[in-house]
Image (cartoon, rainbow, N blue to C red):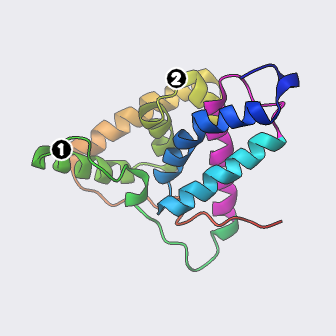
């Protein structure tokens, strides 16, 4: 994307064009609707513009980290509000990629099993599985070492496999966000 000294509007336009859709999909897997995920993506790119000298050449993991922190800040600000309700179905893609009953049942089973995991387990699985980050990149998003991320991923996969084998269980309540509300400052 260019050396830090050349982080001008052209650089930002290229970054936005290349990564916007990825950041929106990241938000769609964690938020209720497309509008909320688009607002989140816009805020992520506002931060990217402000901190453009800090954005690494491999920018997507850095952008995911910004999005994750924005969502965490939003959740912390709203967790005492009465309108926040845990949402189990918000973090899986809305469309099944293959057709047929087997695929639909598989997605439903995965959705149920994933909902039983902690938020941290869900996040490491999403980052590596859906966002297609390496373990090292996921570690950067989560703010931990590569070794810690690898251990978390291993344990999360083991717990997901156990949950898939066990069948239906009650979801663990976690800090899932209903909608992203932009904080005007």
Q: Position of residue 96 (x, y in %)?
A: 26, 47
Q: Is residue 74 magenta?
A: yes
Q: Quadrant of the C terminus?
A: bottom right
The residue nearer to you, when weighing 33 against 21, is 21
The residue nearer to you, when weighing 11 against 44, is 11
- Secondary structure beneath disc 2? loop
Q: Position of residue 25 (x, y in %)?
A: 49, 46
Magenta residues (range): 51-76
The residue nearer to you, when weighing 129 against 36, is 36
Residue drawn at the location 49% of the way across and 71% of the way down: 85
| Vertical relation: 173 (above or below) 137 | below
12 sits to left or right of 104 = right
Residue sitting at the far front: 10
Classify 10 Å Cα crowding around label 2: few (below 14), some (14-19), many (20 and above).
some
182 sits to left or right of 84 = right
Q: Is residue 173 magenta?
A: no
- Mark 1 and mark 2 lie on one chain; the one further toward the N terminus is 1
């Amino acid at each position: 994307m260019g050396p830090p000294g050349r982080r001008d509007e052209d650089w930002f336009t290229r970054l936005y064009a290349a990564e916007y859709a990825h950041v929106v999909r990241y938000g769609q897997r964690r938020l209720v609707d497309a509008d909320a995920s688009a607002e989140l993506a816009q805020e992520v790119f506002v931060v990217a513009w402000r901190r453009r000298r800090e954005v690494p050449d491999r920018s997507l993991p850095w952008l995911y980290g910004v999005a994750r922190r924005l969502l965490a800040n939003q959740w912390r600000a709203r967790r005492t509000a009465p309108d926040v309700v845990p949402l189990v179905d918000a973090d899986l893609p809305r469309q099944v990629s293959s057709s047929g009953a087997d695929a639909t049942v598989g997605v439903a089973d995965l959705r149920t099993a994933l909902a039983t995991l902690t938020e941290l387990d869900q996040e490491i699985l999403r980052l590596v599985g859906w966002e297609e980050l390496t373990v090292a990149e996921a570690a950067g998003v989560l703010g931990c070492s590569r070794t810690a991320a690898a251990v978390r991923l291993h344990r999360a996969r083991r717990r997901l496999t156990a949950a898939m084998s066990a069948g239906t269980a009650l979801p663990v309540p976690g800090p899932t966000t209903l909608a992203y509300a932009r904080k005007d400052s």
